[in-house]
Amino acid sequence: MSKICELLSQLASANRAIASENEAIENYQTKISMAEQELVTKTTKIEKQKDANKLKRREAQKLEGEISALDKKIGDATANQSQASNNDDYATWTKRIAEYKEKVAEIEDNVLEMLEICDQNESQQNELDQQIANLKQETTIKKEDYLSSIEAAKERKADLISRRDAIFSQLGGSFKSFYDRLYAKYGETTVVPIKKESCGGCYMKLTIDLIAQVRTSEDPITCKSCNRVLYTVPLK
Ligand SMILES: [Zn+2]
């Protein structure tokens, strides 16, 4: 294997490793956003339940106010009843008191039912608040974990980039700018091995002459079809 083929092979493998670190970093970042999104979704859902419960509580309080008003009316009617000057008057107040009491009983049933629901919701709410607290803690731990994985991947990537820079400096200054232009087009597959006498990038069949050139040349040789830089892998 010629010196240049070996350098190009190292360059290709450094590129693959850098791409895989980039992918890992992206995956961890996605996981962080997903964990944050999940936290927001669950918190919002529970906050909505809390709001609905507050509303129900207020409705129950309003009905309790109506009961107090009716109780006052019953008090007044009872006073009037005791001062009734005749039987008809007395009967009228008795009837009215009965009506008020019936109304109170009806509202009370309603209020009791509502308060029971509120109590149930509120006890569930405490549980849900606990769930949120747990979820927040889990999310924080997960995020820290992902962030340290990202840091590790970034360190490995920085190491790979400096190794790749060392390869570039061995390949000569003009190669780097040529490579950069090609990289904008082909990315990871800028430098490809010859596979089955074909270009490992575009799969075009290569001439025997060109393959021989790749093996022996002291300069990088490119595919005539796609212009990618070619190298040969040693036969095992
Ligand atoms: Zn090609």
Image: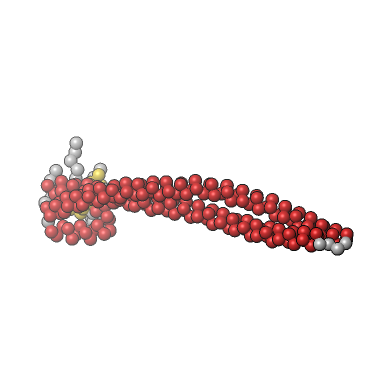
Please give left or right for residue 57 compared with residue 151 in the image: right
Please give left or right for residue 54 compared with residue 88 in the image: left
Q: 9 or 121, which is in the foreground?
A: 121
Q: 93 or 223, which is in the foreground?
A: 93
Please give left or right for residue 131 compared with residue 197 in the image: right
Q: 92 or 27, which is in the foreground?
A: 92
Residue 166 sits above or below residue 236 on the image:
below
What is the quadrant of residue 88 in the picture? bottom right
Q: Whole-percent x and y of residue 149?
A: 29, 47
Q: Whole-percent x and y of residue 19?
A: 27, 50
Residue lying furthest top in this view? 236
Which image quadrant: the N terminus?
top left
Taking the spot 19% from the left edge, 50% from the top edge, the residue there is 159
Q: Whole-percent x and y of residue 41?
A: 46, 53
Taking the spot 26% from the left edge, 59% from the top edge, the residue there is 184
Taking the spot 19% from the left edge, 36% from the top edge, the residue there is 236
Q: 188 or 210, which is in the foreground?
A: 188
- Is residue 219 visible in the rendered structure shown here? no
Taking the spot 75% from the left edge, 55% from the top edge, the residue there is 101
Q: Whole-percent x and y of residue 170?
A: 11, 52
* Number of marks in the rendered image: 0
- Is residue 2 visible in the rendered structure shown here? yes
Snapshot colouring: secondary structure
